[in-house]
Image (cartoon, helix red, strand yellow):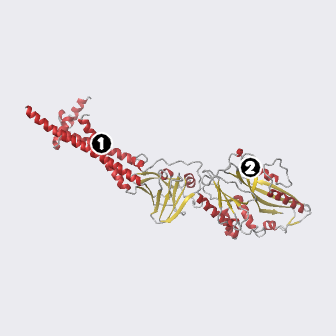
Amino acid sequence: MPASTRRALGAVVAALGIILVVVWAWIVVKLGPSGEASFSATSKSPGAMVIPSDVLNAVDVPVHVTATRRDGGPVRLTVAQSTDARAILGTSAVSTVSAVRYPAGTMDLRVSGAGALADITRTDVWRVALKEPGSAVMVVDQVRAPETVVVTSGDATALTDVTLTLSWAERAWFFEALAIATLGAVLAAFAMNDLWQGRVTTAHGDVVGADTSEVTA
Amino acid sequence: MNRHELMAKGAAALRLRREDMRRRDLITKAASALGVRRDDLVRVVRVMIVTVVGVVGVAMIISVPGWGATHALLGIHKAPTAKASTVPLTVDQAKKILTRSLTAAYLGETKDGAASNTALRAAYTKQGLRGAGGRVKLASVQPAVATSPLEASQPKLLAVSRGFGYPRFIVAQTVAPDGGVPTLHLLTTPNAETPYRISMSVEMVPPATVEPFDRLSQGSSLVTNSAALAVAPAKLLSLYAAQMAFPAKAISQPPFAADSFSVQMREGAAGVAKAVASQATFTQVHKVVPDSLYAVRQASGDALVFGVIERTDLFTVKKDQNVNTAANKAFVLLTGKKVVARKASITTLEFVVFADPRSSGKATLVAAREQIVAGSGS
């Protein structure tokens, strides 16, 4: 392999290694030893907040859902089969979590519908329903997916200014990220060492070449 | 414009000689200006370009939801789709609904006035509510049971719906604390917004038993294709209603076995007709209540068929006769009339449950109950 090609390849590998180290070290720090990924969004629009199965059941581990009202009022968290939840929500005003962004830790909200939600406390579709003042936490496992979480005030008033947080954890993710960062560090170290060795060899060659030319002269 | 002309114009614009625009010269000059060797500068620039391109690429990858390597790391994938065989209720949910409904039913039958009405409406629906309302209204004139099967502390959950369609159902069985015949309960909901309520509670007819349903975790389905059964549930009920008419109508090759309930009904009708014969003519009509039919598939392939038949007892008083109805306390309580000169009618609901075999044989009555719900007279 020509020396210039080898050097270029070394530079590319070194750069990739550095990128892997920087990005995945950041993710390692974000995940922490527990391997927890967390996402938050605040809805200012009046109406229920909805976490559809596209988000709730997009992982294989239990999802922790936390809803917190800024005004400290009651929060009702419910979970039901998605088809039933959609039937209950109808065309009422809701803010739906449409995507999660990592490692930014944010969620996209899509506002849709109009009008107040009917009384949803009478129906039997909710597999779990809990109501707490100010903030409520629910853990949704994946056994009965697809399911949808609906956050309401638990009374006739519409929710506003609610912060919703989703988190899920898997320790393996931390170690996977750590492994990738380590791999990047190893790649970068080898590539930079190769580049350094190439530089020394070239410099040595320059010196040898100079001596030779002097002798020749 | 060719490459040479382009370089000449570029050099003029930058006020450089054309030779200065040659890449090699530029790199050499830049290297000497920075005090490094040319090769080192080339290497550093390459690394910087690769780094920038890499960072931009990685940033793009990790910033696009659902597309990134981080999403793969976090195990984010496409959510599973709903299966038609999923059971919408957990066993715990079904038990809570059952307990709630039976508690409300018990309160409805033991409280008075508005409290009773509220509880009954929370517990029962449709014909179940009509029957319970009639039972409460006539409680003072009907034979009282020692202990209600609604008091059962451990209702036995027999079946829950399979799939996301409506209506959905729960089948349960209770036994009164002091024993006695078991009672079958059918709870139904027509849509997602409406809670489960009792459609009927029917005492079993000894020595009938209920064959097992599929496991609660699998759920049971409503029979939609009655071709696999010995007799279509709708036909079964309509023939059963027809054979109880008075004056009696013969049903050739009935698809159901003889049972004590229908015998009792027919004998009762004949007795009433004989008792009022001098003053009135008596007829009895039985009609299946529309939408009251539920056929739940059992593990063996048989079906348990629930239905309600509305019976109308019609008295046509003969000319110049006044019938004293005081002895019929239920009629007096429902109509407020102690004397009838022209006509009188009593409406009774007959709740019946049949075991319908899967291929051949006759359906057998498993549970039955009658309840007077209305009356009128003139």
Q: Residues within 10 Å of mark 2 (few under 14, many from 20)?
A: some
Quarter of the figure with residue A39 = bottom left
Quarter of the figure with residue B46 = top left
Q: Residue at x 20, y 35 (%)?
A: B24
Tag 1: residue type?
A: Val
Judging from the image, mark 2 belongs to the subunit labelled B
SS type, badge 1: helix
Residue A115 drawn at (x, y percent):
54, 56
SS type, badge 2: helix
Residue at the disc numbered 2 = B234
Q: Residue at x 67, y 54 (%)?
A: B212
Tag 2: residue type?
A: Ala
Q: Is residue B51 visible?
A: no
**Front residue (pair A135, B78):** B78
Give me the disc on residue A13: 1
Q: Residues within 10 Å of mark 1 (few under 14, many from 20)?
A: many
Query: In 3D space, how far apart are the residues under numbered discs 1 and 2 (Cα atoms)?
Result: 76 Å
Residue A129 drawn at (x, y percent):
54, 61
Q: Residue at x 68, y 48 (%)?
A: B301
Residue A132 drawn at (x, y percent):
50, 65
